[in-house]
Image: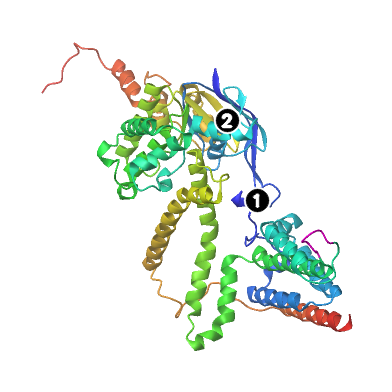
Amino acid sequence: MIRDFTFGQFFPGNSILHRLDPRTKLLWTIAYIVQLFVCDAWISYLVPFLYLVLVIWISKISWVIVLRGVKPVLPLIVFTSVLNMFFVTGTPIVSIGFFHPTYEGLALAVRLTLRIVLLIMGTSMLTYTTSPIALTDGMEQLLRPLEKLRFPVHEMSMIMSIALRFIPTLVEETDKIMSAQKARGADMESGSVIERGKAMIPLLIPLFVSAFRRAEELAEAMECRCYRGGEGRTKLRQLCYTLLDAWTLLSAVVAFGLVIGCNVLF
Amino acid sequence: MAILKTEHLTYRYSPGTPFEKAAVSDVNLEIEEGAFVGVIGHTGSGKSTLIQHFNGLLRPSSGHVYLDGQDIWADKKKIRSVRFQVGLVFQYPEYQLFEETVFKDIAFGPTNMGMTPDEVKRAVEEAMEFVGLSASLAQKSPFDLSGGQKRRVAIAGVMAMRPRVLILDEPTAGLDPKGRDRILKQIRAFHDQTKTTVLLVSHSMEDIADYAEKALVMNHAKLFAYDTVESVFSRSKELEELGLSVPQITRVFHKLRADGMPVRENVYTIPYAIKDLMRQLPKKGGVPHDS
């Protein structure tokens, strides 16, 4: 069911990872992504992999959850892998009629799969261990310098935090409306593409109506509390870096160095 | 003969995550055909989860649900026909309306059942009459109606499927007293006329006492009691320990008895209370007051 969708969810906890400054975690995630795409030699993939294993172990989040996060993109992975195998030219493994799967294609497919899986698992560690509020707070702080260019940083992060805040609400709502329409015999799981598309109408219309209603209510509630943007607004929880953050970022730099080292040596 | 039956019904939310929780735990229950059952329990007691098992929206983690003695999950393909036989009206059902007109929206269920256009028309008209919507509203947009009217359109949408069991999850939440009484009376009339088995979830002990014949009490995911309204409310001490209560009039009568008035103990509804009080008053022929 929709409820089992774990990507982007937050799992409260008290591990070192949970206590890190959200800014550190954001920077760490960016560093991790870049690191993953710098990987070239086969052995260099070991670095982000082991690094991730360490991070997951520290976070105390169950492996089942982390692996389940990859599930939704499995079809994508399979699809691109198959395409790669058959359409990359090179030395053929076997030849069956039109199909010439090649060793080069296979290598590319494996590489791509590794990248996507590590990418999803790594980036989801950010949301698994950071509450949405902390996340947008961190983002706002990191983007602060852009304010000099008149970029509406506060507004953007407010929009983000509201959007994040409403994801679970809307998921729950979708679940509820889906159940209600199923109770009236709506069939959303079978039929042709067009039939399925049509079957979504009883779900989408009530969902849109309620999203607009919620937006209106929220806007009114914010106005009632005199919300007028970020100017002069103070924070209950100030973000501050600790030694732990320094070590984390240092570890990211070291991992980066290792990847480049592997690329050069092998 | 029991129309609905559960055996060791257990349901766990989010198995395998830190949020895992049993919402319904080992419920054994038999609901007789034609009964009007009030379902009570405080928020989070598992009422809503339980009723979603009756029409196969949720699949038990373990245990069985039987409709007419048939395990509803025996054949997965037949689950849709179970949903037509056991109609479920959710909380705040007005948020599920989506069609251009009231008529089309109510016709959604019957059309999905495969009724012919004539049958659909008859079913819709009948359902609109049951919930007291005038025929002139049929061609209006459901989004232009008042809150109470929308609620009744949504209820009619399920009634039009002519289910054998009608389950309503707090159909009166957020309505004013007049709207509340109206909907409950219509549900009662629907039950009386069509002999449909009705399950009504409610937080109001008064409503349960006034309308239901039997009461089903859920507590912390377990079935606490399933019995006639009288015998459930006679356990007022235990109910209060669960954070539930008995109807106000029952509490008044308990107090009266404690103060030494010779009133009956098991009084749950106002009309009955009045009858009992009248019994206490001097009979005709007493001394009139000076006017």
The amino acid marked with disc number 1 is Phe
Q: Which residue is mark 2?
A: B224
Towards the viewer: B8 or B84: B84
Q: Which residue sits furthest left?
A: B291
Residue B168: which numbered mark, if any?
A: none
Residue at 49% over, 27% down: B215
- B290 part of magenta stretch: no
Residue appearing at x 43%, y 37% in the figure: B111
Task: Name the residue at 55% across, 86% down.
Answer: A145
The dominant secondary structure in magenta is loop
Residue B172 appears at what percent x and percent y? 39, 39
Q: Is residue A9 above or below residue A181?
A: below
| In the image, farthest residue toward the right | A265
Q: Please name the amino acid that badge 2 sits on.
A: Phe
Residue at (67% x, 77% y) in the render: A27
Q: Magenta stretch containing residue A97, yes or no?
A: yes
Discs 2 and 1 carry the same chain letter: yes
Q: Earlier in the sequence, mark 2 or mark 1?
A: 1
Q: Which residues are magenta?
A: A95-101
Q: Secondary structure at mark 2?
A: strand
Q: Please tell me how crowded label 1 is: few (under 14), some (14-19), or many (20+) other residues with Cα within 10 Å.
A: few
Pointer 1: what residue?
Answer: B19
Q: Chain of mark 2?
A: B
Colouring of the image: rainbow
Seen from this angle, which residue lies furthest bottom?
A: A148
The chain ID associated with circle 1 is B
| Separation of marks 2 and 1 at Cα, in angstroms | 24 Å
Q: Secondary structure at mark 1?
A: loop
Crowding at label 2, few (<14), some or many (≥20) Cα neighbours within 10 Å? some
Rendering coords of residue B226 (x, y %): 54, 25
Asked if residue A133 is positioned above or below residue A75 in the image, the reply reads below
